[in-house]
Image (spheres, rainbow, N blue to C red):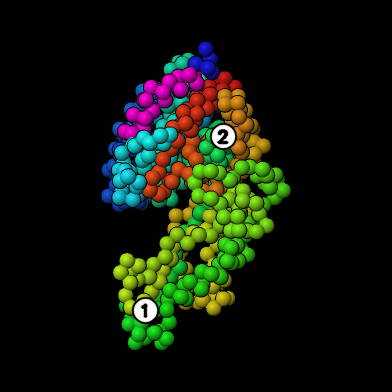
């Protein structure tokens, strides 16, 4: 029986419709951590959707309060089979972003799982309920087929990732022994291509901040005061234009990383970042001397996330007194994070925009990266290749951001991420979805990986 029995059990779990039924139950919980009153819903998700199945799997399960009042609860689970065997820590997050009801195609309810062709729509399908369901169900498939895992497993689930994982680092610091392991293997983010497995060993960091030009109280008639009152929107627009040039290339030297080494370039060389899914890449946007893969996985990028002045739905003939924008820098290892905001403030002063206020950063994730030659990377890659017949795409780090530094720095673990979504999944946007075909393949892949770790 062996590995074939485990992967067959995982395939049957999907083919029987059980995966769809259980994912629908998870999606039905509106675990929107960005909403202040969601606290009880976050706890209910853990106690109703996660705790019972992990207990049934033979785990000792604990629910924990967050040491940070801004964050949601945690769940930990432990199944120890043999202290001489490796221990794998698995992570997932059950919180989601705003549902954005009314903006989904065909008036779909974001908290009702909807099937359309090869897609399961619903908030959390890709980020992250579908992904941690796959990993847990694959563990169950191995147990069903052979009665044991052959290794020790620990699981930690948080409910605040979408607001920057407040309290996660402090929780890990306080529970180091409970969470001690040999490796983190988890799933979040997208595959590079939907039909090919992907591995990444870290993530870009992210820091959010506001730029504000606040000149006066209220707005004033543009006829009576036009040409006499400085326009904060124009000032802010010109200030933003100095941060990047017309093709989006960074103009602040301190924001450029020093980690784009020949080894990183070699790891990214030839990876197929172009795709038929999702929006088309702009070939003339970003750093001109870099390939698209290098821009996304080995360089820093600046984005204007939102901008506000007046009411675009009801504009008035008036010069506004204030303008504000929320900005973000995604950054890789090799960026001096202590200099991100100070360098921006000095840059704006040097360019004559001392009136632009820069807020202190919010929701920062640190950048991390594991050596692609690490033994656990090779071990996971070999298992994926054996199970699927495909050599996985291996990235130095995810282009997005995760609380990976809590694992690498606090728990001192090597981290290997195996994502089960794809870049066109519309996470954090209306119409979030996963591909049914990718989910089925991922269940088989993970069952094979758990089996191989138990027989390594």
Residue 383 or residue 293, whichever sits in front: 293
Q: Where is residue 244 in the image (x, y as percent from the top left)?
A: 57, 65
Depicted 171 relative to depicted 2: above or below: below
Q: Position of residue 278 (x, y in %)?
A: 49, 46
Depicted 442 relative to depicted 292: above or below: above
Question: Would residue 114 be found to the left or right of residue 443 on screen?
Answer: left
- Please report whichever mark, 2 or 1, sits nearer to the chain's N-terminal start: 2
Whether residue 8 is in magenta: the answer is: yes
Depicted 351 relative to depicted 148: above or below: below
Quarter of the image where one finds residue 224: bottom left
Residue 229's disc number: none
Name the secondary structure under disc 2.
Answer: loop
Q: Dot 1 corresponds to which residue? A: 319
Residue at 35% from the left image edge and 67% from the top image edge: 312
Q: How many numbered markers are drawn?
A: 2
Residue at 51% from the left image edge and 73% from the top image edge: 238
Residue at 43% from the left image edge and 82% from the top image edge: 230
Residue at 61% from the left image edge and 58% from the top image edge: 284
Quarter of the image where one finds residue 352: bottom right
> Around disc 1, counting alpha carbons within 10 Å, would you say few (fewer than 14), some (14 to 19), or many (20 or more)?
many
How far apart, in angstroms, are the residues tagged by discs 2 and 1?
53 Å
Residue 448 or residue 308, whichever sits in front: 308
Residue occupying the far top of the picture: 1
What's the magenta region? Answer: 6-26
Residue 196's disc number: 2
Quarter placement of the C terminus: top right
């Amino acid at each position: 029986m062996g590995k074939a029995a485990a992967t067959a059990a995982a395939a049957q779990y999907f083919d029987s419709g059980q995966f769809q039924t259980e994912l629908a139950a998870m999606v039905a919980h509106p675990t929107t951590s960005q909403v202040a009153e969601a606290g009880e819903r976050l706890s209910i998700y853990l106690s109703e959707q996660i705790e019972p199945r992990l207990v049934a799997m033979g785990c000792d399960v604990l629910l924990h309060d967050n040491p940070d009042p801004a964050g949601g609860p945690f769940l930990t689970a432990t199944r120890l089979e043999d202290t001489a065997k490796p221990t794998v820590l698995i992570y997932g997050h059950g919180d989601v972003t705003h549902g954005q009801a009314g903006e989904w195609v065909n008036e779909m309810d974001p908290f009702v799982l909807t099937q359309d062709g090869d897609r399961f729509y619903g908030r959390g399908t890709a980020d992250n309920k579908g992904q941690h369901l796959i990993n847990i169900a694959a563990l169950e498939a191995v147990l069903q087929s052979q009665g044991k895992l052959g290794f020790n497993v620990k699981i930690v689930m948080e409910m605040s990732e979408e607001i920057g994982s407040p309290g996660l680092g402090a929780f890990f610091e306080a529970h180091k022994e409970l969470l001690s392991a040999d490796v983190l293997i988890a799933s979040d983010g997208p595959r590079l291509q939907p039909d090919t497995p992907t591995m990444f060993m870290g993530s870009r960091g992210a820091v959010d901040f506001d730029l504000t030009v606040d000149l006066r109280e209220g707005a004033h008639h543009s006829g009576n005061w036009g040409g006499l009152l400085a326009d904060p929107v124009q000032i802010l627009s010109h200030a933003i234009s100095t941060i990047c040039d017309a093709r989006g290339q960074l103009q602040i030297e301190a924001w450029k990383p020093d980690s784009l080494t020949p080894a990183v370039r070699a790891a990214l060389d030839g990876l197929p970042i172009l795709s038929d899914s999702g929006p088309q890449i702009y070939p003339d946007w970003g750093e001109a001397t870099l390939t698209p893969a290098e821009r996304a996985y080995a360089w820093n990028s600046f984005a204007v996330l939102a901008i506000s002045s007046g009411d675009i739905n009801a504009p008035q003939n008036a010069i506004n007194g204030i303008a504000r924008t929320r900005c973000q820098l995604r950054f890789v290892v090799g960026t001096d994070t202590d200099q991100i905001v100070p360098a921006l403030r000095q840059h704006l002063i040097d360019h004559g925009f001392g009136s632009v206020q820069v807020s202190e950063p919010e929701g920062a994730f640190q950048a991390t990266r594991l050596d692609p030659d690490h033994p656990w990377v090779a071990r996971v890659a070999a298992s994926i290749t054996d199970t699927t017949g495909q050599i996985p795409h291996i990235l130095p780090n995810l282009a997005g951001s995760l609380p990976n530094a809590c694992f690498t720095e606090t728990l001192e673990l090597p981290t290997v991420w195996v994502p089960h979504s794809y870049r066109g999944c519309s996470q954090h946007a209306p119409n979030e979805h996963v591909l049914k075909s990718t989910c089925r393949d991922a269940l088989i892949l993970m069952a094979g990986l758990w089996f191989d770790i138990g027989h390594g």
